[in-house]
Amino acid sequence: MGTGRDEVYCHGKIAALKHSIIGVVLGVLAGCTSQPEAVDAIEEIQIVKRPDFSGSWEMDYRSSDEADEKIRWQYMEALAAEERARQSEDSRYRSAALDHLRSGNLSQGIVAIGRFTEEISRADVLTIRQDPERITIEREDDYALTCEFSLAPEVDGPFGQEGCVWYGDQLIFDLKLPEGLNVRHTLSRGVDRVNLATSVYYDRIPFTLNRTYTPFVPGDEQYDCEFKVATLKTCTLGAPEQ
Amino acid sequence: MTLFRLGVFILLAGCASAPEPPPPRVPLDVPLRVSSYNGPALNISIKEFDPGVVDAVLMPIRHAEVRYMPVVLKRTLIEVGGWGAVRVLPAEDPSAEVLVLGRIIKSDGVALSLNVQVKDATGRQWFSKTYTDYAFEPYEEKPGIQKDPFDDLYNNVVNDINQARNSLSATDLESVFDTATLRYAASLSPDAFSEYFLKDETGHLQLIGLPARDDAMFVRSERIRESEYGFTDTVDEAYTLFYHEIHQTYAHWRKYSHELVLGNALLGVEERRRRSWTAAKQSFSTYKESRLNEDALRKMTDAFDAEVTPTVTSLEGTMIHLSGTLQSRYQEWRHILQNIYTAERAIAR
Protein backbone atom coordinates (compact mmCIF):
# COMPACT_ATOMS: atom_id res chain seq x y z
CA MET A 1 0.00 0.00 0.00
CA GLY A 2 1.53 3.28 -1.05
CA THR A 3 1.60 5.73 1.78
CA GLY A 4 4.22 8.22 0.81
CA ARG A 5 6.62 7.07 3.50
CA ASP A 6 8.55 5.18 0.82
CA GLU A 7 10.00 8.45 -0.33
CA VAL A 8 11.03 9.15 3.20
CA TYR A 9 12.60 5.99 4.41
CA CYS A 10 15.56 4.23 2.96
CA HIS A 11 13.56 1.07 3.41
CA GLY A 12 11.14 2.24 0.79
CA LYS A 13 13.93 2.48 -1.73
CA ILE A 14 14.91 -1.10 -1.02
CA ALA A 15 11.39 -2.27 -1.65
CA ALA A 16 11.16 -0.38 -4.88
CA LEU A 17 14.29 -1.89 -6.34
CA LYS A 18 14.37 -5.33 -4.80
CA HIS A 19 15.31 -7.05 -8.06
CA SER A 20 18.90 -5.85 -7.71
CA ILE A 21 19.55 -6.35 -4.05
CA ILE A 22 23.18 -5.48 -3.72
CA GLY A 23 22.94 -2.35 -5.81
CA VAL A 24 19.94 -1.22 -3.91
CA VAL A 25 21.44 -1.84 -0.50
CA LEU A 26 24.57 0.00 -1.45
CA GLY A 27 22.51 2.84 -2.80
CA VAL A 28 20.31 2.85 0.22
CA LEU A 29 23.12 2.83 2.68
CA ALA A 30 24.97 5.47 0.72
CA GLY A 31 21.82 7.53 0.84
CA CYS A 32 21.55 6.90 4.52
CA THR A 33 25.08 8.05 5.08
CA SER A 34 24.13 11.56 4.13
CA GLN A 35 21.41 11.50 6.82
CA PRO A 36 23.16 9.20 9.22
CA GLU A 37 20.78 9.05 12.12
CA ALA A 38 17.75 11.06 11.34
CA VAL A 39 14.56 10.63 9.44
CA ASP A 40 14.30 13.15 6.63
CA ALA A 41 12.33 16.21 7.54
CA ILE A 42 8.97 16.45 5.83
CA GLU A 43 7.76 19.73 4.48
CA GLU A 44 4.09 20.32 4.92
CA ILE A 45 2.07 19.90 1.75
CA GLN A 46 -1.26 21.68 1.86
CA ILE A 47 -4.30 20.19 0.23
CA VAL A 48 -7.70 21.75 -0.15
CA LYS A 49 -9.63 19.27 1.97
CA ARG A 50 -8.05 17.21 4.66
CA PRO A 51 -9.43 13.73 5.13
CA ASP A 52 -11.54 13.02 8.16
CA PHE A 53 -10.21 10.09 10.15
CA SER A 54 -12.85 10.27 12.88
CA GLY A 55 -14.45 7.12 14.16
CA SER A 56 -13.84 3.77 15.77
CA TRP A 57 -11.57 1.47 13.82
CA GLU A 58 -10.52 -2.13 14.35
CA MET A 59 -7.55 -3.88 12.83
CA ASP A 60 -8.10 -5.82 9.63
CA TYR A 61 -5.51 -8.58 10.00
CA ARG A 62 -5.93 -9.83 6.46
CA SER A 63 -4.93 -6.47 4.97
CA SER A 64 -2.25 -5.66 7.50
CA ASP A 65 1.39 -6.62 7.27
CA GLU A 66 2.21 -9.94 8.85
CA ALA A 67 5.13 -9.04 11.09
CA ASP A 68 6.91 -12.42 11.22
CA GLU A 69 6.77 -12.82 7.48
CA LYS A 70 8.04 -9.31 6.83
CA ILE A 71 10.88 -9.66 9.32
CA ARG A 72 11.87 -13.02 7.87
CA TRP A 73 11.81 -11.70 4.31
CA GLN A 74 13.89 -8.64 5.13
CA TYR A 75 16.26 -10.71 7.25
CA MET A 76 16.92 -13.09 4.34
CA GLU A 77 17.49 -10.17 2.01
CA ALA A 78 19.88 -8.59 4.47
CA LEU A 79 21.82 -11.85 4.89
CA ALA A 80 22.15 -12.10 1.14
CA ALA A 81 23.28 -8.50 0.88
CA GLU A 82 25.81 -9.00 3.65
CA GLU A 83 27.16 -12.14 2.01
CA ARG A 84 27.55 -10.38 -1.31
CA ALA A 85 29.26 -7.47 0.41
CA ARG A 86 31.75 -9.82 2.03
CA GLN A 87 32.40 -11.60 -1.25
CA SER A 88 32.98 -8.35 -3.04
CA GLU A 89 35.48 -7.17 -0.45
CA ASP A 90 37.85 -5.03 -2.39
CA SER A 91 39.94 -2.21 -0.98
CA ARG A 92 38.98 -0.09 -3.98
CA TYR A 93 35.34 -0.13 -2.84
CA ARG A 94 35.54 0.62 0.84
CA SER A 95 32.74 2.66 2.29
CA ALA A 96 30.86 3.03 5.52
CA ALA A 97 27.88 1.37 3.85
CA LEU A 98 29.86 -1.70 2.85
CA ASP A 99 31.50 -1.92 6.24
CA HIS A 100 28.08 -1.79 7.80
CA LEU A 101 26.98 -4.72 5.65
CA ARG A 102 30.12 -6.75 6.19
CA SER A 103 29.75 -6.46 9.95
CA GLY A 104 26.43 -8.30 9.88
CA ASN A 105 24.75 -5.42 11.68
CA LEU A 106 21.96 -5.14 9.13
CA SER A 107 20.51 -8.65 9.48
CA GLN A 108 20.76 -8.64 13.26
CA GLY A 109 19.36 -5.14 13.46
CA ILE A 110 16.39 -5.92 11.23
CA VAL A 111 15.24 -8.67 13.55
CA ALA A 112 15.54 -6.48 16.66
CA ILE A 113 14.01 -3.42 15.07
CA GLY A 114 11.31 -5.45 13.35
CA ARG A 115 10.25 -7.00 16.66
CA PHE A 116 10.25 -3.59 18.29
CA THR A 117 8.13 -2.15 15.46
CA GLU A 118 5.67 -4.98 15.88
CA GLU A 119 5.53 -4.35 19.62
CA ILE A 120 4.66 -0.67 19.23
CA SER A 121 2.07 -1.17 16.49
CA ARG A 122 -0.13 -3.77 18.13
CA ALA A 123 -3.17 -1.63 18.84
CA ASP A 124 -6.24 -3.59 17.76
CA VAL A 125 -8.55 -0.60 18.08
CA LEU A 126 -8.18 3.07 17.20
CA THR A 127 -10.60 5.71 18.40
CA ILE A 128 -10.05 8.87 16.42
CA ARG A 129 -11.48 12.28 17.22
CA GLN A 130 -10.82 15.05 14.77
CA ASP A 131 -11.92 18.65 14.40
CA PRO A 132 -10.48 21.54 12.39
CA GLU A 133 -7.95 22.32 15.12
CA ARG A 134 -6.70 18.94 16.28
CA ILE A 135 -6.78 15.19 16.04
CA THR A 136 -6.47 12.60 18.78
CA ILE A 137 -5.82 8.99 17.90
CA GLU A 138 -6.42 6.83 20.93
CA ARG A 139 -4.71 3.49 20.54
CA GLU A 140 -5.66 0.53 22.65
CA ASP A 141 -2.97 -0.14 25.29
CA ASP A 142 -0.76 2.60 23.95
CA TYR A 143 -0.38 6.35 24.25
CA ALA A 144 -2.53 8.60 22.09
CA LEU A 145 -1.13 10.32 19.03
CA THR A 146 -2.25 13.93 19.14
CA CYS A 147 -1.75 16.80 16.75
CA GLU A 148 -2.63 20.46 17.06
CA PHE A 149 -2.70 21.54 13.44
CA SER A 150 -1.86 25.15 14.16
CA LEU A 151 1.38 24.39 15.96
CA ALA A 152 4.86 24.14 14.49
CA PRO A 153 5.41 20.79 12.74
CA GLU A 154 8.30 19.88 14.98
CA VAL A 155 9.21 21.01 18.47
CA ASP A 156 12.01 20.22 20.85
CA GLY A 157 10.36 18.63 23.83
CA PRO A 158 12.02 17.51 27.03
CA PHE A 159 12.30 13.99 25.67
CA GLY A 160 13.50 14.67 22.14
CA GLN A 161 11.95 16.10 19.01
CA GLU A 162 8.27 15.53 18.42
CA GLY A 163 6.01 16.75 15.71
CA CYS A 164 3.19 16.16 13.30
CA VAL A 165 2.61 17.45 9.82
CA TRP A 166 0.25 16.99 6.89
CA TYR A 167 1.96 15.44 3.90
CA GLY A 168 -0.66 15.64 1.22
CA ASP A 169 -3.60 13.73 2.58
CA GLN A 170 -1.45 11.81 5.03
CA LEU A 171 -0.77 12.86 8.57
CA ILE A 172 2.70 12.12 9.87
CA PHE A 173 3.74 11.93 13.53
CA ASP A 174 7.47 11.97 14.20
CA LEU A 175 9.40 11.21 17.33
CA LYS A 176 13.18 11.48 17.46
CA LEU A 177 14.76 10.37 20.70
CA PRO A 178 18.29 11.46 21.58
CA GLU A 179 19.59 7.87 21.37
CA GLY A 180 18.98 8.00 17.63
CA LEU A 181 15.76 6.03 17.72
CA ASN A 182 13.22 7.55 15.36
CA VAL A 183 9.60 6.51 15.24
CA ARG A 184 7.21 7.70 12.58
CA HIS A 185 3.48 7.00 12.37
CA THR A 186 1.83 7.76 9.05
CA LEU A 187 -1.95 7.88 8.99
CA SER A 188 -3.70 7.68 5.65
CA ARG A 189 -7.30 7.24 4.60
CA GLY A 190 -8.75 4.84 2.06
CA VAL A 191 -12.33 4.02 1.20
CA ASP A 192 -13.82 2.60 4.40
CA ARG A 193 -10.43 2.08 5.97
CA VAL A 194 -7.46 3.84 7.46
CA ASN A 195 -3.85 2.76 7.36
CA LEU A 196 -1.43 3.42 10.19
CA ALA A 197 2.12 2.73 9.10
CA THR A 198 4.66 2.53 11.92
CA SER A 199 8.25 3.09 10.83
CA VAL A 200 11.23 2.70 13.11
CA TYR A 201 14.69 3.86 12.16
CA TYR A 202 17.77 3.14 14.22
CA ASP A 203 21.45 2.88 13.40
CA ARG A 204 20.78 3.26 9.67
CA ILE A 205 18.28 0.39 9.75
CA PRO A 206 14.66 1.09 8.81
CA PHE A 207 11.62 -1.09 9.33
CA THR A 208 7.97 -0.39 8.56
CA LEU A 209 4.77 -2.22 9.39
CA ASN A 210 1.43 -1.30 7.85
CA ARG A 211 -1.68 -1.81 9.89
CA THR A 212 -5.04 -1.45 8.21
CA TYR A 213 -8.16 -0.65 10.17
CA THR A 214 -11.82 -0.89 9.19
CA PRO A 215 -14.72 0.92 10.86
CA PHE A 216 -16.77 -0.73 13.56
CA VAL A 217 -19.51 0.26 15.96
CA PRO A 218 -18.43 -0.30 19.54
CA GLY A 219 -20.52 -3.11 20.89
CA ASP A 220 -22.93 -3.15 23.78
CA GLU A 221 -20.55 -5.14 25.89
CA GLN A 222 -17.78 -2.61 25.78
CA TYR A 223 -17.08 -0.67 28.93
CA ASP A 224 -17.27 3.04 28.51
CA CYS A 225 -15.33 4.92 31.14
CA GLU A 226 -15.23 8.63 31.77
CA PHE A 227 -13.61 10.80 34.37
CA LYS A 228 -15.70 13.20 36.37
CA VAL A 229 -14.56 15.45 39.12
CA ALA A 230 -17.51 14.58 41.26
CA THR A 231 -17.52 10.83 40.77
CA LEU A 232 -13.93 10.16 39.68
CA LYS A 233 -13.87 7.35 37.14
CA THR A 234 -17.23 5.99 36.14
CA CYS A 235 -17.55 2.98 33.87
CA THR A 236 -20.76 1.92 32.22
CA LEU A 237 -21.62 -0.78 29.76
CA GLY A 238 -22.32 0.42 26.27
CA ALA A 239 -20.90 2.33 23.38
CA PRO A 240 -19.46 5.79 23.98
CA GLU A 241 -21.48 8.68 22.67
CA GLN A 242 -20.35 9.64 19.20
CA MET B 1 22.85 19.09 50.84
CA THR B 2 23.46 15.37 50.61
CA LEU B 3 26.57 13.98 48.96
CA PHE B 4 24.39 12.68 46.13
CA ARG B 5 22.94 16.10 45.46
CA LEU B 6 26.40 17.62 45.54
CA GLY B 7 27.70 14.97 43.14
CA VAL B 8 24.91 15.51 40.64
CA PHE B 9 25.33 19.24 40.92
CA ILE B 10 29.05 19.00 40.12
CA LEU B 11 28.32 16.59 37.25
CA LEU B 12 25.71 18.91 35.77
CA ALA B 13 27.99 21.88 36.19
CA GLY B 14 30.61 19.95 34.21
CA CYS B 15 28.13 19.29 31.40
CA ALA B 16 27.61 22.98 30.78
CA SER B 17 29.23 24.08 27.57
CA ALA B 18 27.87 27.64 27.35
CA PRO B 19 30.46 30.40 27.48
CA GLU B 20 29.01 31.74 30.70
CA PRO B 21 28.38 29.20 33.39
CA PRO B 22 24.70 28.87 34.26
CA PRO B 23 23.58 29.86 37.72
CA PRO B 24 24.15 27.10 40.24
CA ARG B 25 21.32 24.57 40.32
CA VAL B 26 21.15 23.91 44.01
CA PRO B 27 18.16 22.10 45.44
CA LEU B 28 16.45 24.02 48.20
CA ASP B 29 16.60 22.66 51.69
CA VAL B 30 14.02 24.71 53.56
CA PRO B 31 12.10 23.36 56.53
CA LEU B 32 8.65 24.70 57.19
CA ARG B 33 8.95 27.21 60.02
CA VAL B 34 6.14 26.91 62.50
CA SER B 35 4.87 30.40 63.10
CA SER B 36 4.43 31.84 66.56
CA TYR B 37 1.82 34.21 65.15
CA ASN B 38 -1.21 34.51 67.39
CA GLY B 39 -3.01 37.42 65.77
CA PRO B 40 -6.32 37.27 63.89
CA ALA B 41 -6.57 34.54 61.26
CA LEU B 42 -6.76 36.01 57.77
CA ASN B 43 -8.49 34.16 54.95
CA ILE B 44 -6.34 33.37 51.93
CA SER B 45 -7.59 32.88 48.40
CA ILE B 46 -5.23 31.23 45.94
CA LYS B 47 -6.18 31.85 42.34
CA GLU B 48 -5.67 29.03 39.86
CA PHE B 49 -2.09 29.52 38.62
CA ASP B 50 -1.15 31.14 35.33
CA PRO B 51 0.30 28.48 33.00
CA GLY B 52 3.00 30.83 31.72
CA VAL B 53 4.77 30.05 28.47
CA VAL B 54 5.07 26.35 27.78
CA ASP B 55 6.08 24.02 24.95
CA ALA B 56 3.06 22.72 23.09
CA VAL B 57 3.93 19.14 23.99
CA LEU B 58 3.70 19.99 27.68
CA MET B 59 0.47 21.98 27.50
CA PRO B 60 -1.82 19.15 28.71
CA ILE B 61 0.41 18.70 31.75
CA ARG B 62 0.51 22.42 32.43
CA HIS B 63 -3.28 22.60 32.36
CA ALA B 64 -3.33 20.06 35.17
CA GLU B 65 -0.52 21.74 37.08
CA VAL B 66 -2.25 25.12 37.27
CA ARG B 67 -4.95 23.45 39.40
CA TYR B 68 -2.71 20.99 41.21
CA MET B 69 0.04 23.28 42.50
CA PRO B 70 -2.27 25.80 44.25
CA VAL B 71 -3.63 22.88 46.28
CA VAL B 72 -0.09 21.84 47.31
CA LEU B 73 0.48 25.42 48.46
CA LYS B 74 -2.84 25.41 50.28
CA ARG B 75 -1.96 22.17 52.09
CA THR B 76 1.36 23.65 53.18
CA LEU B 77 -0.38 26.78 54.52
CA ILE B 78 -2.84 24.64 56.44
CA GLU B 79 -0.01 22.51 57.80
CA VAL B 80 1.78 25.49 59.29
CA GLY B 81 -1.46 26.98 60.67
CA GLY B 82 -2.29 30.49 61.75
CA TRP B 83 -4.62 31.16 58.83
CA GLY B 84 -8.35 31.27 58.44
CA ALA B 85 -9.97 29.63 55.44
CA VAL B 86 -7.52 28.81 52.66
CA ARG B 87 -9.33 28.40 49.36
CA VAL B 88 -8.34 27.70 45.76
CA LEU B 89 -10.53 29.54 43.27
CA PRO B 90 -10.79 29.84 39.49
CA ALA B 91 -10.78 33.63 39.47
CA GLU B 92 -9.69 36.54 41.65
CA ASP B 93 -11.79 36.76 44.77
CA PRO B 94 -13.00 40.32 45.39
CA SER B 95 -13.49 39.59 49.05
CA ALA B 96 -10.09 38.01 49.62
CA GLU B 97 -8.26 39.25 52.66
CA VAL B 98 -5.05 37.87 51.19
CA LEU B 99 -4.75 36.90 47.54
CA VAL B 100 -2.03 34.63 46.15
CA LEU B 101 -1.29 34.65 42.42
CA GLY B 102 1.13 32.18 40.92
CA ARG B 103 2.72 31.68 37.52
CA ILE B 104 4.49 28.51 36.47
CA ILE B 105 7.80 29.28 34.83
CA LYS B 106 9.22 25.78 34.57
CA SER B 107 8.12 22.33 35.63
CA ASP B 108 9.66 19.19 34.20
CA GLY B 109 10.14 16.89 37.17
CA VAL B 110 13.75 18.03 37.64
CA ALA B 111 13.16 21.76 38.10
CA LEU B 112 10.19 23.66 39.39
CA SER B 113 10.14 27.42 39.09
CA LEU B 114 7.20 29.51 40.23
CA ASN B 115 6.58 33.22 40.43
CA VAL B 116 4.42 33.99 43.43
CA GLN B 117 2.75 37.31 44.11
CA VAL B 118 0.94 37.96 47.37
CA LYS B 119 -1.18 41.00 48.15
CA ASP B 120 -3.81 41.89 50.68
CA ALA B 121 -7.22 43.50 50.41
CA THR B 122 -5.82 47.01 50.69
CA GLY B 123 -3.80 46.41 47.53
CA ARG B 124 -0.56 46.27 49.48
CA GLN B 125 1.80 43.86 47.75
CA TRP B 126 3.50 41.65 50.30
CA PHE B 127 6.00 40.35 47.78
CA SER B 128 6.46 39.10 44.24
CA LYS B 129 9.21 36.57 44.03
CA THR B 130 10.42 33.73 41.83
CA TYR B 131 11.20 30.45 43.55
CA THR B 132 13.14 27.61 41.98
CA ASP B 133 13.88 24.17 43.32
CA TYR B 134 15.54 21.11 41.83
CA ALA B 135 15.03 17.42 42.37
CA PHE B 136 18.17 15.54 41.34
CA GLU B 137 17.70 12.47 43.49
CA PRO B 138 15.84 9.58 41.88
CA TYR B 139 12.14 9.53 42.57
CA GLU B 140 10.65 6.87 44.79
CA GLU B 141 9.79 3.59 43.11
CA LYS B 142 6.15 4.40 43.76
CA PRO B 143 6.12 8.18 43.54
CA GLY B 144 3.56 10.30 45.28
CA ILE B 145 3.20 8.07 48.32
CA GLN B 146 5.45 10.08 50.58
CA LYS B 147 6.47 13.67 50.04
CA ASP B 148 6.38 16.10 47.16
CA PRO B 149 9.89 16.36 45.66
CA PHE B 150 9.53 20.14 45.64
CA ASP B 151 8.10 20.60 49.10
CA ASP B 152 11.10 22.80 50.00
CA LEU B 153 9.86 25.31 47.43
CA TYR B 154 6.39 25.40 48.95
CA ASN B 155 7.91 25.64 52.44
CA ASN B 156 9.90 28.61 51.24
CA VAL B 157 6.82 30.36 49.82
CA VAL B 158 4.79 29.76 52.98
CA ASN B 159 7.63 30.92 55.22
CA ASP B 160 7.78 34.15 53.21
CA ILE B 161 4.00 34.63 53.38
CA ASN B 162 4.08 34.13 57.14
CA GLN B 163 6.99 36.48 57.53
CA ALA B 164 5.22 39.18 55.50
CA ARG B 165 2.06 38.82 57.58
CA ASN B 166 4.01 38.84 60.86
CA SER B 167 5.62 42.12 59.90
CA LEU B 168 2.22 43.85 59.73
CA SER B 169 1.09 45.85 62.71
CA ALA B 170 -2.19 45.14 64.48
CA THR B 171 -3.60 48.28 62.83
CA ASP B 172 -2.54 47.05 59.40
CA LEU B 173 -4.19 43.68 60.01
CA GLU B 174 -7.39 45.32 61.19
CA SER B 175 -7.35 47.49 58.09
CA VAL B 176 -7.02 44.37 55.91
CA PHE B 177 -10.11 42.84 57.55
CA ASP B 178 -12.19 45.99 57.25
CA THR B 179 -11.09 46.73 53.69
CA ALA B 180 -11.89 43.18 52.57
CA THR B 181 -15.36 43.43 54.07
CA LEU B 182 -16.05 46.80 52.51
CA ARG B 183 -14.56 45.79 49.15
CA TYR B 184 -17.01 42.94 49.04
CA ALA B 185 -19.89 45.23 49.96
CA ALA B 186 -18.72 47.70 47.28
CA SER B 187 -18.62 44.92 44.70
CA LEU B 188 -22.34 44.40 45.40
CA SER B 189 -23.25 48.06 45.68
CA PRO B 190 -20.51 50.40 44.45
CA ASP B 191 -22.58 53.54 44.92
CA ALA B 192 -23.29 52.82 48.58
CA PHE B 193 -19.84 51.74 49.75
CA SER B 194 -17.20 53.23 47.46
CA GLU B 195 -17.28 56.46 49.45
CA TYR B 196 -15.49 54.74 52.31
CA PHE B 197 -12.32 54.23 50.25
CA LEU B 198 -9.58 56.47 49.07
CA LYS B 199 -6.87 55.29 46.77
CA ASP B 200 -3.51 56.77 47.76
CA GLU B 201 -0.65 57.65 45.45
CA THR B 202 0.78 54.11 45.64
CA GLY B 203 -2.52 52.61 44.55
CA HIS B 204 -3.36 51.24 48.00
CA LEU B 205 -6.89 51.52 49.28
CA GLN B 206 -7.25 53.49 52.45
CA LEU B 207 -10.35 53.38 54.57
CA ILE B 208 -11.64 56.80 55.38
CA GLY B 209 -14.66 55.62 57.29
CA LEU B 210 -16.82 52.65 58.14
CA PRO B 211 -20.58 52.14 57.92
CA ALA B 212 -22.43 51.60 61.15
CA ARG B 213 -22.28 47.95 62.21
CA ASP B 214 -26.09 47.77 62.14
CA ASP B 215 -26.39 49.54 58.80
CA ALA B 216 -29.06 47.50 57.00
CA MET B 217 -27.24 47.45 53.67
CA PHE B 218 -23.98 46.51 55.32
CA VAL B 219 -25.62 43.72 57.33
CA ARG B 220 -27.22 42.45 54.13
CA SER B 221 -23.87 42.42 52.30
CA GLU B 222 -22.34 40.48 55.20
CA ARG B 223 -25.09 37.90 54.93
CA ILE B 224 -24.57 37.58 51.18
CA ARG B 225 -20.86 37.22 51.80
CA GLU B 226 -21.50 34.28 54.14
CA SER B 227 -23.50 32.64 51.35
CA GLU B 228 -20.62 33.21 48.98
CA TYR B 229 -18.26 31.53 51.42
CA GLY B 230 -20.49 28.47 51.31
CA PHE B 231 -20.23 28.33 47.54
CA THR B 232 -16.50 29.05 47.38
CA ASP B 233 -15.96 26.19 49.81
CA THR B 234 -17.70 23.94 47.29
CA VAL B 235 -15.52 25.27 44.49
CA ASP B 236 -12.44 24.78 46.64
CA GLU B 237 -13.49 21.20 47.34
CA ALA B 238 -13.59 20.54 43.59
CA TYR B 239 -9.93 21.58 43.38
CA THR B 240 -9.02 19.36 46.32
CA LEU B 241 -10.86 16.47 44.70
CA PHE B 242 -9.01 17.11 41.46
CA TYR B 243 -5.72 17.15 43.37
CA HIS B 244 -6.42 13.74 44.89
CA GLU B 245 -7.61 12.38 41.57
CA ILE B 246 -4.51 13.30 39.58
CA HIS B 247 -2.00 12.96 42.41
CA GLN B 248 -0.70 9.47 41.56
CA THR B 249 -0.80 9.94 37.81
CA TYR B 250 0.97 13.28 38.02
CA ALA B 251 3.61 11.84 40.35
CA HIS B 252 4.31 9.09 37.82
CA TRP B 253 4.46 11.54 34.94
CA ARG B 254 6.95 13.61 36.91
CA LYS B 255 9.04 10.53 37.68
CA TYR B 256 9.32 9.55 34.00
CA SER B 257 9.93 13.13 32.94
CA HIS B 258 12.65 13.30 35.59
CA GLU B 259 14.35 10.21 34.18
CA LEU B 260 14.29 11.53 30.63
CA VAL B 261 15.30 15.11 31.39
CA LEU B 262 18.06 14.20 33.83
CA GLY B 263 19.25 11.43 31.52
CA ASN B 264 19.63 13.92 28.68
CA ALA B 265 21.45 16.42 30.87
CA LEU B 266 23.84 13.90 32.36
CA LEU B 267 24.81 12.05 29.22
CA GLY B 268 24.55 14.64 26.49
CA VAL B 269 23.15 13.98 23.04
CA GLU B 270 26.31 12.64 21.43
CA GLU B 271 26.93 10.17 24.20
CA ARG B 272 23.36 8.98 24.04
CA ARG B 273 23.70 8.38 20.31
CA ARG B 274 26.56 6.01 20.99
CA ARG B 275 24.55 3.98 23.44
CA SER B 276 23.08 0.60 22.71
CA TRP B 277 19.81 -0.54 21.18
CA THR B 278 18.76 -1.71 24.63
CA ALA B 279 19.29 1.81 25.98
CA ALA B 280 17.30 3.25 23.07
CA LYS B 281 14.41 0.87 23.74
CA GLN B 282 14.54 1.75 27.44
CA SER B 283 14.38 5.42 26.56
CA PHE B 284 11.34 4.79 24.36
CA SER B 285 9.73 2.79 27.14
CA THR B 286 10.18 5.71 29.55
CA TYR B 287 8.78 8.07 26.92
CA LYS B 288 5.77 5.81 26.44
CA GLU B 289 5.05 5.63 30.16
CA SER B 290 5.34 9.39 30.37
CA ARG B 291 2.89 9.81 27.49
CA LEU B 292 0.43 7.33 28.98
CA ASN B 293 0.38 9.35 32.20
CA GLU B 294 0.03 12.52 30.14
CA ASP B 295 -3.01 11.01 28.39
CA ALA B 296 -4.60 10.18 31.75
CA LEU B 297 -3.87 13.69 33.05
CA ARG B 298 -5.35 15.22 29.93
CA LYS B 299 -8.56 13.25 30.37
CA MET B 300 -8.88 14.23 34.00
CA THR B 301 -8.15 17.89 33.26
CA ASP B 302 -10.62 17.92 30.39
CA ALA B 303 -13.21 16.42 32.72
CA PHE B 304 -12.50 19.17 35.25
CA ASP B 305 -12.88 21.82 32.53
CA ALA B 306 -15.96 20.34 30.95
CA GLU B 307 -17.74 19.17 34.08
CA VAL B 308 -21.36 19.69 33.26
CA THR B 309 -22.92 18.09 36.30
CA PRO B 310 -25.03 20.93 37.69
CA THR B 311 -24.37 22.20 41.15
CA VAL B 312 -27.44 22.44 43.28
CA THR B 313 -26.98 24.66 46.24
CA SER B 314 -29.22 26.23 48.78
CA LEU B 315 -29.44 29.95 49.34
CA GLU B 316 -31.64 31.00 52.22
CA GLY B 317 -34.10 28.20 51.61
CA THR B 318 -34.09 28.57 47.83
CA MET B 319 -32.51 25.83 45.71
CA ILE B 320 -30.26 27.24 43.02
CA HIS B 321 -29.10 25.21 40.02
CA LEU B 322 -25.80 26.15 38.46
CA SER B 323 -24.35 24.58 35.34
CA GLY B 324 -21.37 24.94 33.04
CA THR B 325 -17.70 24.93 33.89
CA LEU B 326 -16.49 25.66 37.38
CA GLN B 327 -15.34 29.08 36.28
CA SER B 328 -18.69 29.96 34.71
CA ARG B 329 -20.56 28.61 37.71
CA TYR B 330 -18.45 30.79 39.96
CA GLN B 331 -19.27 33.85 37.85
CA GLU B 332 -22.94 32.86 37.68
CA TRP B 333 -23.10 32.49 41.45
CA ARG B 334 -21.63 35.93 42.01
CA HIS B 335 -24.14 37.36 39.56
CA ILE B 336 -27.02 35.69 41.43
CA LEU B 337 -25.81 37.08 44.75
CA GLN B 338 -25.56 40.55 43.26
CA ASN B 339 -29.12 40.27 41.92
CA ILE B 340 -30.42 39.12 45.29
CA TYR B 341 -28.71 42.01 47.00
CA THR B 342 -30.13 44.50 44.49
CA ALA B 343 -33.64 43.04 44.82
CA GLU B 344 -33.56 43.10 48.61
CA ARG B 345 -32.30 46.63 48.58
CA ALA B 346 -35.14 47.73 46.30
CA ILE B 347 -37.68 46.12 48.62
CA ALA B 348 -36.11 47.80 51.66
CA ARG B 349 -36.50 51.17 49.98
Image: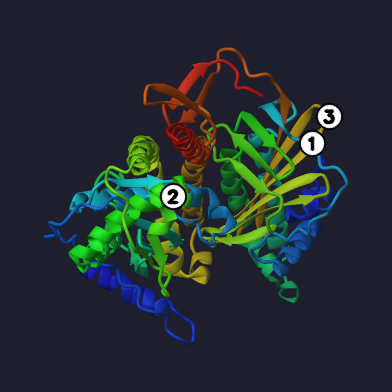
Give the quarter of the figure containing the C terminus of chain B: top left
Q: Residues within 10 Å of mark 2 (few under 14, many from 20)?
A: some
Q: Chain of mark 2?
A: B
Q: Position of residue B134 (x, y in %)?
A: 34, 65
Q: Position of residue B27 (x, y in %)?
A: 29, 68
Can the viewer see residue B248? no
- Between disc 2 and disc 1, the foreground one is 2
Q: Residues within 10 Å of mark 1 (few under 14, many from 20)?
A: some
Q: Residue furthest top?
A: A220
Nearest the viewer among B236 and B154 is: B236
As drawn, the label of residue B192 is 2
Looking at the rendered structure, whether the residues under marks 2 and 1 are on a common chain is answered as no
Q: Report the amino acid beneath label 3.
A: Val
Can the viewer see residue A203? yes
Give the residue at mark 1: A189
Q: Secondary structure at mark 2?
A: helix
Q: Report the amino acid beneath label 1.
A: Arg
Residue drawn at (21%, 52%), measured in percent from left and top?
B41
- Between disc 2 and disc 3, the foreground one is 2
Looking at the rendered structure, whether the residues under marks 1 and 3 are on a common chain is answered as yes
Residue drawn at (49%, 52%), measured in percent from left and top?
B62
Q: Secondary structure at mark 3?
A: loop
Relative placement, left or right, of B275 versus A172 is left
Q: Report the amino acid beneath label 2.
A: Ala
As drawn, the label of residue A191 is 3
